[in-house]
Image (tube, grey):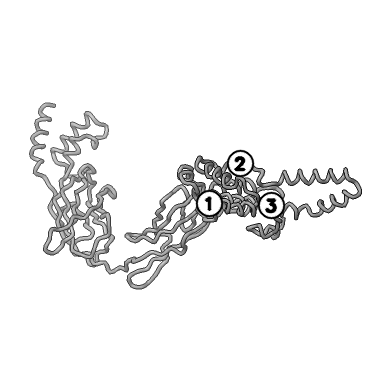
Amino acid sequence: MFKLIIKLFIMFSVSMSAYAQSGFSQEHLVSVSPDNLTQFVANDTSIEIEFDLNIDEKSIKKNTIVLKREIENTKNVMIDGTTTIKNATTFIFTPNEALLNARYNVKVKKIKLQDFSNENKTRFQKYAQKICSYFYDDVEKCFLYRYACSIKTKEIKYSFNVEDIQVQVISLTLNKSNIQLNENNQTDINVTASYDDNSTQDVTQDVEWIMSNNSVISVSNNIITPLSEGTTTLQAKLNNQTSAQIQITVYKEINGYKLPPEPDPTINNSTLLGIDSNDNGVRDDVEIYVIKRFAQDLEFPKTKTAIAMQYAWASQKILESPFIESKRYSNDAIDCQYYWFHQKQKDINQRIIDLDETDFNAAIQESLKAGKWRKENKVFNDSEIKEKIHNTRERIEQKFSYNAALSGSIFNGRSESIDNCQINIDSLGE
């Protein structure tokens, strides 16, 4: 056993000088792509080196392949990229960006190959195999045997020219601009590439989608699917080109009413007027409450929502300008509601008048019924809408300022008409 180890050591020392042949002519090199004879190398090319033996993966480093672009009268520019193992016998260098049309120099550093074949084994390999067999079931896992079977390649140096004659993408265009999308619906989108030869092509299936908020939508093939309420930007990317951004807003809808996005409470309550994303004069959190509260009413969803929105709009105007002149806004909202009451109770009011002449007690009962109906359907009886509108100290103080401005004033009575309503409630069909 001792003699065997001595022999192994001697052969180990001698083997230090064993290398594969160098350059393009080395024995185990199968191919280099692109090589120095390749014409019209594409801009998106990668450098691929293939051998006929397995590669020792540990010998492949980040800078095993070095690629530099020649620049006249200045230092060559190093090209950043990634070196990876493609398969057992091949490794690849992939540039991070498309190559420019220019001349490039390639340097492939020495690596190790593994030859575990049983043909033409050297004495050193045989002795290493025998020693390792005492300790390993699989001798190929033994460091000594792997070393004995390793072949170090020679360095490869060559140059090639990138002259891409393929047409290049110069712009990407989406077929839609900003999108408003109901949370229960999907929509499609397509991308057209324009090339430097003035041609165009649909590249929807080839692009990468870039979103500012991945929780709002997903894009599969050309279908946009809502995931949650909110807003995100969307753009397409192909090679080094990106399309212009579009904005996609996913919204909730109740009984035909589109809800604005739920505002951030901190931001919304940091100012007097808060957030009004759809610019309709009603703060978003108040509008969301109104629609959720009234748009699902079993009898009069459209009418109550219209009146409540007018009341919320009037309250916002008063917050903005808490002076006596602003009272006309709240007057119109209240008068619109009473106009609706009178229209809905025309028949019962006439019946009360007729009964008053013949049956006073019956007239009283009808009056009580009418009063109960008005109380049940009076939008402004909803205390929560008032609390929602005046939900910060600044807004409450503004309300007090408005009440102070009205203090001591005498107001004449008003007659209700459809003209008091911002929306023609007679046309709502309720």
Q: In x, y percent, where is residue 108?
A: 17, 52
Q: Which amino acid does label 2 sit on?
A: Glu
Furthest residue toward top:
2
249 vs 102, left or right, is: right
Which circle's residue, 2 or 3, is located before the other in the chain? 3
Identify the residue position indicated by label 3 in the image: 337
Q: Nearer the viewer, residue 149 or 348?
A: 348
Number of labelled discs? 3
Q: Are marks 2 and 1 in contact (CB under 8 Å)?
A: no
Real-space Cα separation, disc 2 to disc 1, in angstroms: 22 Å
- Secondary-structure class at tag 1: loop
Q: In x, y percent, where is residue 56?
A: 22, 43
The quadrant of the rendering that contains the C terminus is bottom right
Identify the residue position indicated by label 2 in the image: 384
115 vs 228, left or right, is: left
Q: Which amino acid does label 1 sit on?
A: Ser
Q: Does residue 90 appear in the picture of this structure?
A: no
Is residue 56 shown above or below 211? above
Real-space Cα separation, disc 2 to disc 3, in angstroms: 18 Å
Real-space Cα separation, disc 3 to disc 1, in angstroms: 23 Å
Q: What residue type is labelled 3?
A: Gln
Q: In x, y percent, where is residue 396?
A: 54, 41
Identify the residue position indicated by label 1 in the image: 321
Q: In x, y percent, where is residue 29?
A: 19, 53
Select label 3 or label 1 by which is in front.
1
Q: Do the residues labelled 3 and 1 touch (CB within 8 Å)?
A: no
- Secondary-structure class at tag 3: helix
- Secondary-structure class at tag 2: helix
73 vs 284, left or right, is: left
The quadrant of the rendering that contains the N terminus is top left
